[in-house]
Amino acid sequence: MSALFDILASAGLWAAVLRIATPLILATLGALISERAGVLNLGIEGIMTFGAMVGWLAVYNGADLWTGLLVAALGGAMFGLLHSVLTVTLGLSQHVSGLGVTLFASSFAYYVFRLMVPVAGTPPTITPFQPLDIPGLSDLPFFGPAFFTQTAPTYLAIGLAIALAYLIARTPVGLAIRMTGENPHAAEAQGLNPMAIRYGAVIFGSALMGVGGAFLTLSAFNSFFPTMVQGRGWICIALVVFASWKPERALLGAILFALFDAFQLRLQTVLSGVVPYQIFLMIPYLLSIVALAVMARRARVPQALMQPYRRGER
Amino acid sequence: MRFERREHRSTLLVVATPILAVIAALAIAGVLIAAAGAPVFEAYWKILTSAFGSRLSATETLTRASPLILTGLAAAVAFRARLWNIGGEGQFYLGAIAAAAASAHLFAGLPSLLQIPLLFIVGAFAGMVLLLVPLWLRLRFSVDEVVTTLLLNFVALLFVSMLIDGVLKDPAAFGWPQSEAVDAAARLPKLLARSRLHIGLGIAVVIAFLIYFVQTRTVFGVQSRAAGLNPSGAVFAGVPLGRTLVIVAMISGGLAGLAGTIEVLGVKGYVTTDLSPGYGYSGIVVAMLANLNPLGVVLAALFTATMFVGADGMSRSMGIPTYIADVTVALSLLSMLVAVFFTQYRIRR
Amino acid sequence: MTDTVLDIKNVSKSFGDNLANDDISLSLAKGEIVALLGENGAGKTTLMSILFGHYVPDTGSVSVMGQALPAGKPRAAISAGVGMVHQHFSLAPNLTVLENVMTGTESLWSIGSNVSAGRKKLLDISQRFGLKVDPDARLGDLSVGEQQRVEILKALYNDARILVLDEPTAVLTKLEAETLFSTLKDMARQGLSLIFISHKLDEVMATADRIVVLRGGRQVAERKVGETSKAELAELMVGRKVTRPVREASTPGEIVLEAAGITVRSGGVDRLKSVDFRLRAGEVLGIIGVSGNGQAVLAQLLSGTIGRSAGDLVLFGKGVGDLTVADAVSCGIGRIPEDRNRDGVIGEMAIWENAVLERLPEFSKAGLVDRKAGIAFATRIIEGFDVRGGSPTSRIRLLSGGNMQKLILGRNLIERPKILLAAQPARGLDEGAVAAVHERILEARKAGTAVLLISEDLDEVMALADRIQAIVGGRLSPSVNAEHVDAQRLGLMMAGEWGGASDAV
């Protein structure tokens, strides 16, 4: 028992929580906003992979870290555009084209990476984002190292979650997005262009997924390797449901999830040899499934989610 | 611009669709090859010769196609009933490890004629179970099975990794995590001597014909098609929706599990975590390329295997990353989606 | 005229080979109510979609208050003061009333939404026109009548001067409809101009100042309301004299189906509350009610797709518990579903497959489908029931609504069922097809089939039924003899006022 307590009381755990949560927050917000407009984006896993690769590659080739994030956002947006053409303009199955985008984006990322970076014994590295020193706060005992030793993108992600919560609930454009996800015909009847809104939401959301992926290579780690996203995208899709399509709850959900993850990582070292480490690694995926089962019926799904919109067709 | 449904689809168009899609995908991949500074047509030629240029390469391609036919069928059967089974990869691994474990511990010593069919059943059963869980979650809690089957792929792979690093670990493997070898009597007979090609190919093709027959001729086939096309219409006509989905899930999960079993019994003889280069995921592409037609799956699997084996060889001689195969296969999925759309709709101003 | 607010000139629009609007002109004055009368497919909705900018016309122009309206821009139509109340409401059930109304009314790029100003404006308008709503209620919690109020308020909130209502009474009770029409007249007095689309002659005569009749995409007549009659309008609308079949007197046989105290609970709500009825061979029992009052549940129960929570179902004198679809089909219950596209057919499957799907056991041997017999069965239906537009092997989606319905009727009636369950059998069909469907139902009655007719259409029920029961909030009224009631009485029954009076069965 005391071992468990020691884990929870260590500042390192809490610092890790926010670090693990950041890519989840960003990508979950991306998936959330596009689902709010009625488009499920299963391209998320591949888009995160591509963002991780292309952001890293930009920095490796001399760009600064922020430019790296921007490049990742643009890369994500590019695949968002592809997904929009397939699902919004053509109205194809959002499931299948999302999977197609994932397969394409990740294999394309690996291809480009291999092309630009020859095979080497140890993977090349970059200098990642460094923790921000916030005068006063970072020096606090426990709280300082626990919560105020993060890199800038982490604070950006948290700020973004709050901003999106406001945007969706309180602004005209948020209402327009919600209406498009609930009933695109009603949105059009009010003079809005549901197609354009869906395009915007999917592309913006995909840019966030790209940035979420890039956090892995530009802040959490310092190199890129294939399969590094490891299902985080799918977990984000589950988190959206868990959050009932609300950004503020997505923030909490991602942090809660990261807490479990950070906790199990530390528990692994405590219990190594007793319990196989694979059991711990399964926990995040199983947890996502449980969260889905608990929330799926309760959550108020956007009514037009996954329904293609064609003008004049009901 | 608007799209209008086509009233009639010509057979020619339906047959031409996947071919056009593949050509489009190859054209885009060509741009990527050119971007890498390699001569495009030579690269394509290398792919083709590396896949079929010699007896060795041709048998290798066919060996690769066998599991793809089965995972492709697994996806095609499920998708036709609108059951989005994206968990083929996990089901493949469970099928493989279940068969390996059963052969090493349960059925060791049984003659081939008895042992192999028993192992097929065990492997298929393992795949089935892994798909019935998400189906249950869907029917009971309305959880979208796409996400759950995807997540279970990771769980299944970790589970396999745990077993081959633990209770099923081969003590003779110098510490490498791999399962104990299957019983010699469980190894599938070769189709061709001095090659890796085993009877799994024949089994997969026969199953494809069998499924084609079931889907087009039987009551269950018609009912499951109705259930996929219009669930509430099917219910009104008395199709037991839940039961149909359960049977479809058992067939689909079973096929993916069987793919894993056949791969381990036919090719490697033991299980590692790199037994499958993504057969489960490629199976989805194969199914879509075949437009969910079981016979088309055989051809689509052959194409996909050609790309993978061919790109391996091409990459060695031309310095193009082998990932070009994955890119081309993913692109052909996307272009197939678009092509199918245009067989159903036409553009109107 | 100086006070013309809307001028539609020579508008034509075709979809493929189908000419939906052929050179139509229409004008509207301030404070005027014009009715657009026509059957399904006459081109009414197309014309209004052009006015509202959903479609771009092939030729012709629309001007509002003397200003030409750019084609294909709903935003422009809204800001010019055109408001549309759709038949299928354009509302989002998960959002609040205020959110539904305010969507798209503010600049998308403003940082915040002025909710309090929006609320004030909404309440002002609702007071001015007597359309009471709670701005913060979730729309999905409102009744259909209240939702329509929101739909109207939405248009008024956008400062509409011209209001178009598409079949506004299709989902309302008679009482709600009367309230609506007095509201509309009040609006016209306050200077709004209204176009309402309808095929109901009573409404049109009672409410409109002027009536424009469309038929087959063409404008066939324009009449002042004082200068025409229902009979003339009916003929103009249909283009020929249509006689619906007449019910002949008959003596009903024995009771074939009896429901006693049947309750169906789902989602924690009683959808049917202790329902009683008896159905005899050779009679038509009409169940009338406004949509959403439990008739769909009753139809599902008798179709075998849902089970009951309490009560007894007695079929041919034997208690049957819960029916399954297979039971229903095998004991000779023919079933015509309310929504033929959703439940009645599998659009992408062949006509023959749709013909045999519910009776596959009869058309299969050892689990194998007997395709030949299925095609022969479908051929018999196509010939016997005059289904046009497809062969047994073509996809059923290619059939028109009327022909699809004939096929559904055929697959049920060809085997001479003992009971026919017909839910909204003529919904959405044009006049010719309606007559054909009614004729078939009466033929079946004559042959001794017991028919349970569930309908929202008073005329249909009065024309076909021997006895009538109303369904309101899941309860079924006692039955009345069709000879002894008029539309007035049925309207009251549909509103739940059935008193104690009933005729003995």
Image (spheres, coloured by chain):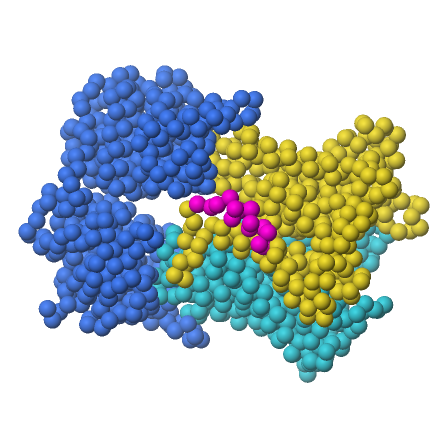
Chain colours: A cyan, B yellow, C blue
The quarter of the picture where the C terminus of chain C appears is top left
Left or right of residue C338, residue C227 in this image: left
Q: Which residue: 60% across, 71% down?
A: A73
In-front residue for pair A123/B203: B203
Instruction: Name the residue located 17 percent from the left edge and 37 percent from the top edge.
Output: C242
Quarter of the figure with residue C503: top left
Q: Nearer the viewer, residue B55 or A149?
A: B55
Q: Is residue C93 magenta?
A: no
A249 lies above or below B274: below
For residue A42, what is the image quadrant? bottom right
**Residue A231 shows in this picture:** yes
Tell me, yes or no, whether the highlighted magenta stretch contains residue B12.
yes
SS majority, magenta: helix
Q: How many marks?
A: 0
* Magenta span of residues: B8-21
User: Does any portion of residue C100 appear in the rendered image?
Assistant: no
Looking at this view, name the residue that lies furthest to the bottom: A135
The location of residue C361, given as percent across then percent down, is 49, 24
Q: In the image as oriented, which residue stretches furthest toward the left?
A: C227
Front residue of this view, candidates C340 and C165: C340
Q: Position of residue B194 (x, y in %)?
A: 86, 42
User: Residue B321 at what x, y percent from top left?
Assistant: 75, 63
Q: From the image, which quarter does the N terminus of chain C lie in?
A: bottom left
Give x and y (percent) for residue C179: 20, 51
Residue drawn at 36 percent across, 33 percent down = C407
Q: Quick check: B330 left or right of C275? A: right
